[in-house]
Image: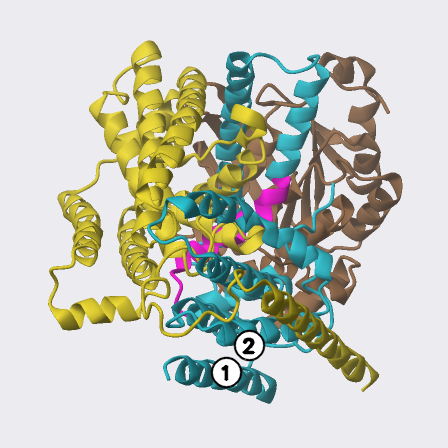
Chain colours: A brown, B yellow, C cyan
Amino acid sequence: MTEYAIRITRLSYSYPDGTKALEDVDLDVRVGERVALVGPSGAGKSTLLLHLNGVLSGKGMIRVMGKPLGDTALREIRRHVGLVFQNPDDQLFCPTVFEDVAFGPLNLSISPQEIPHRVERALRDVGLDQSIRNRPSHHLSHGERKRVALASVLIMEPDILALDEPSSNLDPRNRRHLIELVASLPSTLVLATHDLGMVMALCPRTALMDRGKIWADGETRRILADARLMEEHGLEVP
Amino acid sequence: MHIPDGFLSGRIWLSLDALSSVTVLYAARRLRVQASGHTVPLMGVLSAFVFAAQLLNFPVLGGTSGHLVGSALLAVLLGPLAAFLTMVTVLIAQALFLQDGGLAALGANIFNIAAVPVLSGYGIFRLAGGTQSHGRRLAIASFLSGWVSIELCALCCALELSLSGAIPLRVGLPAMTGYHAILGVAEGILTSSVLVFLSHTRPDLIRRGAGSRLPVADWVAVVALVAVPCAILVLAGSSNLPDPLQRLLASADPVYGRQGESEPFLSPLRYREFLRALTLIAGAIGSAYFLGRLMRGKRSKL
Amino acid sequence: MRHNFIDRYANLDSPLHVLEARTKILGYLSLIAALLLMPGRNDVVLLVYAFVAAILVGASQVPLGYIAGRSLVILPFVLLAGIAAPWTNSFDGARFMALATRSFLSVTILLLMTSTTPFPELLRGLQKLGCPRILILNLGFLYRYLFVLTEEVLRMRQARDCRRAGRAPPRVELKLLGSMLGSLVLRSFERAERMYQAMLSRGYAGEFPVLAPRRFTWRDLTFLAGIALLIVSSFRYAGR
């Protein structure tokens, strides 16, 4: 049972105004597996990610590390699932980098003495200099902010990492660093992106999403090579 | 409109500081009971919005320019309590970042620019039926709430300045209210065009904020808020007070207090002495500055 | 775009920059209050305060031009008071000058406080001094998102300026501004929604965690003692 990190069965979700965002989505992810969610903008990838830690809750069944997602287990689930948002400006809301990175652990009531060490380690893990910690996030470059956003999630040591468009707006060098960094992490990975190069570098498995549904799910090489399927859903064979 | 330090007499800024801190503490406590989870980031982002929106100037008379104040707009979007605290945040930030408004005068500025316009804007918007309607009615209600909020703000400002003896009412009142009557039109148009725009795109936002009623307890607090400073100001202004109180008020008043105690050192009427004193003072202050700068040299060598 | 118009000089190294935020808040605040409450019109005392302010400005290493430029914000009020002066019952040039001096010194001291302390530290200090939590949070959000929103505003203004030639009549101008502000409000609402989701994702449960502040050192005590000495002696002198 617990060999599945995530099991989603028949998940549907509509926005408050009635627009359907997800329709009968099924997705199973094994522990340690790296899965890419590809699809055009507005396909429902981000909405699906927001369901993984219960920020949004639609109709259907979601199990994370074997436990069903309900109100009772939410804080526990959020410890297991680390979600990195597409725009670091949404994720980093504190005055300084240190407070942002420490936000998660402080909420999880980890002892205050331990937090500086943890912050130090998290910043080192994402390849940032320690001098950055007292700076305000708006003084950082976009690439640095992306890394801090990642550090603010990694510090909680999640079993499952969910990344939303991690390579958007990154220059080629920062993108390569990011790919190397994510490749070195042991956790289960769900990666929502348009960046098919990154998918090929990181994920053996791909699920293709469009209009709230999963249309194909299987080996990355096969799906990305299927020209007809890709073009039908607004993508290109890389 | 933001009053800097030095223009208000002690009794005015001290009493308004006291009043505003009580109001802020009260509102913060009430909000903790009422607010839902996402109100906190919403207030934060909207305070940044108001701050940023004030960078967008539009031309007014004679080369001067105005900008949105936003109290009435926030009152409609967030409800009075959250709007008040959001405006307080903006005012603190303006004092700290831009030196717009003094630190000691912060209480007065909170009263003029946060408390009075938010409450009046909110009250008028509700009275004019802005919550129930679309289109024209909404536009008129929000225009009125914007205009009145600015005008009341200017009125309070002029009153405080004249009671402080800095700018007499004969000059201050027409200057402030006249100029702000024009600014108020702009504020009204902006408030109503933003709200009309939102009523087309996200009508739920207006409903949510303006629909949040003030409970009776808060109305009592509001009445006290208006009544207490008025009473203080009226009492302070009249000379029929018992003597000890009169003296207490006068002692906290640098402009009125102790008139003619000594011949002013810097009277511009005594030109030669004035000039000599001025060079002396400039020299002393200059050397004090360089003395200060030297302290760095020592420290960084250590 | 330049991002540092707020705490541009806050990371210099000077005797004032090493002080704890609470020390500076308390010290400067009482300095301003004393300056404004000084009884009478004792010019000598005002001079002493100007002297102290000059030493502090020098010690802070903040450029003079910056302080001078920023303190111009009091100008409209000084002008209004100047214009109004002949209407007062007793025109008194000295009184007007004392008023302007007090105002100018207060602004200088306020500038000293904000330009020698990084804003996040100032916030932590205010919080320790009992400022309501919601205001501290709001100020933190404002500081964080001010630049994000300002950039949006500037981009919108550029777009507006690109699409028109010269100034439109005021009515049109205001209408344009109104719709710009409207979409800005809308974006703010959406951003707040996403921020809230990000907060929830990292275990937010209604309370913001608090970090420990810095400790007081002998430097802070010396600074506060100096200010207290100045205030007490100036009041005794002025009250003579």
Residue position marked by numbered label 1 in the rendering: C230
**B144 or B249: which is nearer to us?**
B249
| Depth check, front residue: A59 or B77 | B77
Q: Which residue is at a point 72% across and 76% down the rendered structure image?
A: B287
State the separation of the CA atoms marked 1 and 2.
9 Å
Looking at the rendered image, the quarter that the N terminus of chain B falls into is top left
Note whether C41 is above or below A230 in the view shown.
below
Which residue does the numbered mark 2 point to in the structure image?
A: C48
What secondary structure is found at the residue carrying circle 2? helix
Residue C206: image location, x then y, percent: 40, 54
Looking at the image, how many numbered discs can be counted on the residues? Answer: 2
Q: Foreground residue, C216 or A182?
A: C216
Left-right relation of C6 to C96: right
Callout 1, which amino acid?
Answer: Leu
Residue B97 locus on image (x, y percent): 57, 53
Secondary structure state at the residue bearing disc 1: helix
Residue A27 in which image quadrant: top right
Subunit of label 1: C
Few, some or many residues within 10 Å of mark 2 (<14, 14–19, 20+): some
With respect to residue B109, does C212 lie above or below? below
| Residue plotted at (50% across, 83% down) | C230
Q: Which residues are magenta?
A: C129-148
Instruction: Check if mark 1's residue and mark 2's residue have beta carbons within 8 Å.
Output: yes
Q: Is residue A71 visible?
A: no
Q: Magenta stretch: residue C144 in it?
A: yes
Among the 4 quarters of the image, the one containing residue C161: top right
Residue in view at x 53 percent, y 56 percent: B96
Q: Is residue C198 magenta?
A: no
For the residues carrying marks 1 and 2, which lies nearer the camera in this image? Answer: 2
Closer to us: A224 or B21 = B21
Residue farthest to the right? A173
Which tag, 1 or 2, sits closer to the chain's start?
2
